[in-house]
Amino acid sequence: MTEKAHRLRLLQHQSARLERRLGVLRRRSDQFSRWRLGLFALGGVVSGASFLQWGPVAWLWVTAVAFTPFIAAVIVHRRVENAVIRFVIWHCMTQSHLARMTLDWPQLPAARPFPVTADHPFAQDLDIVGEFSLHRLLDTAVSQEGSHRLHDWLLDPSPQVDAVQVRQRRVRELARQTRFRQRLALQAALPVDGSSPQRAPQFAGQELLAWFGRESGEGSLRPLLLVLALLAVVNWVLFAGYQLWQWPPLWLGSALVYGVLFITLGFQRAASLFSDVLFLDERLRVLNGVFAFLEQWRYDQMPEVQQLCQPFLVEGERPSAHIRRVQKVMVGVGLRQNWLLGFLLNALLPWDIYFAYRLDQCRDALAAQLPRWLDVWYELEAASSLATFAYLNPGEWVWPALTAAEESIFAAEQLGHPLIPGEQRVCNDVRLDEARPIYLVTGSNMAGKSSFLRTIGVNLVLAYAGGPVVAQSFQASWLRLFATIRVADSLSDGFSFFYAEVRRLSQLLIALNAAGERPLLFLIDEIFRGTNNRERLIGSQAYIQTLAQGTGLGVIATHDLELVQLAEASDKIQNVHFRDAVVDGRMVFDYKLHPGPCPTTNALKIMQLAGLPVEPPPAADR
């Protein structure tokens, strides 16, 4: 049994255990629901009987005792329900991991729609984004911004060397810390609005940052608060003198002034106070769980992650201290939600103005710190996605060696495509360097040329994101990536397929010859397929010769066997090919890369096998 098969079986057993545990907890929750109903009914009967038998004084004491078992049952039931929620989330995470290991796309979380420009050098060509994409396979982030951070890493056309090296060290540490990754995801996924765990909304930090960055339209409330507090004291003194020492009712005038100032200058801010607190309460509950977890974790075996999490470890400036201050404001605002109690509190004190002022203070303090805390969380979520990919595919990957040497190189042994299931994946060796920088790949239809191009590109994307690559060894210098594999026409822009292809190849040449940039790794599938054979051959020969004169590395796949002669005129071009065979009346492919030009074609064979009226090819061409 392979290492991955063993891990898959362990996760399947874990999923089964979680499902059994969930069944037990749900039955226990149902029992507590029945007990709560019974205890409430029993408490009501005892309370009513005591009132009729012993009167209102004894009734208060008996009622308090009679409903104590019901209150205890509510508390325990709530704990059981919280456990159910946690186990549901954990079970969903395990099922998602199983789907990632087996590439069971229908069971994976839906792809998040992030915008990508049509002219991006490789996003669409390499299936980095979309329904069946690398990003969807990797993405385990709960927050939208964490998912977007991973998206940006994968699509960065020119990643920074230092940033990639730091990311790779963090991903290496996180790959060994399964418990840390699971608990971080669990804390972030806990629902905060009473929704089921499966339908809990994804945390979106941008709207929270926008709220904290918003300035109060009324300016500082401090002067108004001081004036109203002084008037409130005057009101108390004058009212006490009116009641105790028969002073004239001067308190009526001061109370009128107090009320007018409160309504005209503070009412608008007080009116928005409850909506602001409600907005914060729903979001800070998620952050409080995540941030508290990051504050309390021991990072002994993760020095790089500990360095990243330093903002959570600074005594006195930890997020929990700031969030506690906001929660105190929430408690104060909550007391005045009863309209009668709210009226009395604001009549006696500038209650709403005080808590609005405190909320503004908390907002100012958090506005300076929150972006850093959120940035750390998003970074951890994106890095954890790559680490989880490493954890779920043991024995199939290696950490890439990214070299800063001046010589351009891309070399890998047993390089495979991460979006092809392991039992179907065929791996190949690749080596491109300045001496032999270009592969010219020929082969029959469906032999694996396009998949080979994507295999090279997608693994380089993984390497530059900081993750592992599907190979036995992998070495690459710092390159830019450009692919023209999936070209489409555009009705809205008025582009034909051929013109769209020409534009794309023109963009590739511009990128290849860009001054002061890193060397380019280009991946091209079928040059000028949108025109006739003669013009395609002439244009392809000229284009490939131009590429060979540049400083980039690349792989070009083609059906035109006439192009293999270019290798005879240039040492920079290597001919390689994929083969096919007909076995028992059907096409068979080994998907292995072989040296030299392809000796056969299969278009007529495929037509004949499909029953089309095609004469069999001459024996010399078979």
Image: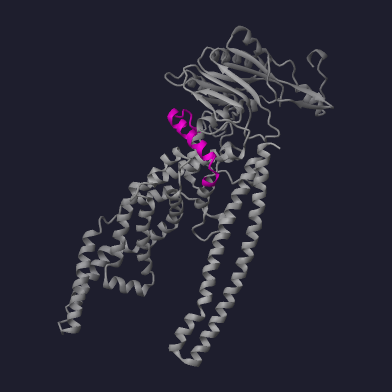
Residue 288 horizontal/vertical position (percent): 43, 54
Number of marks in picture: 0
Name the quarter where the C terminus is drawn.
Answer: top right
Q: Measured along the vertical axis of the image, is residue 29 above or below residue 284? A: below
User: Toward the viewer: 191 or 110?
Assistant: 191
Q: Main secondary structure of the magenta part?
A: helix
Q: For residue 243, which quarter of the picture? A: bottom left
Q: Which residue ends up furthest to the top in the rendered image? A: 569
Q: Report the span colored magenta.
A: 155-180
Q: Is residue 520 visible?
A: yes
Q: Quick check: 559 left or right of 582?
A: left
Residue 117 horizontal/vertical position (percent): 50, 34
Residue 60 horizontal/vertical position (percent): 45, 84
Q: Is residue 4 magenta?
A: no
Q: Which residue ends up furthest to the right in the rendered image? A: 584
Q: Which residue ends up furthest to the front in the rendered image? A: 300
Residue 460 horizontal/vertical position (percent): 55, 28
Residue at point 81%, 17% (across, down): 617
Residue at point 19%, 77% (across, down): 251
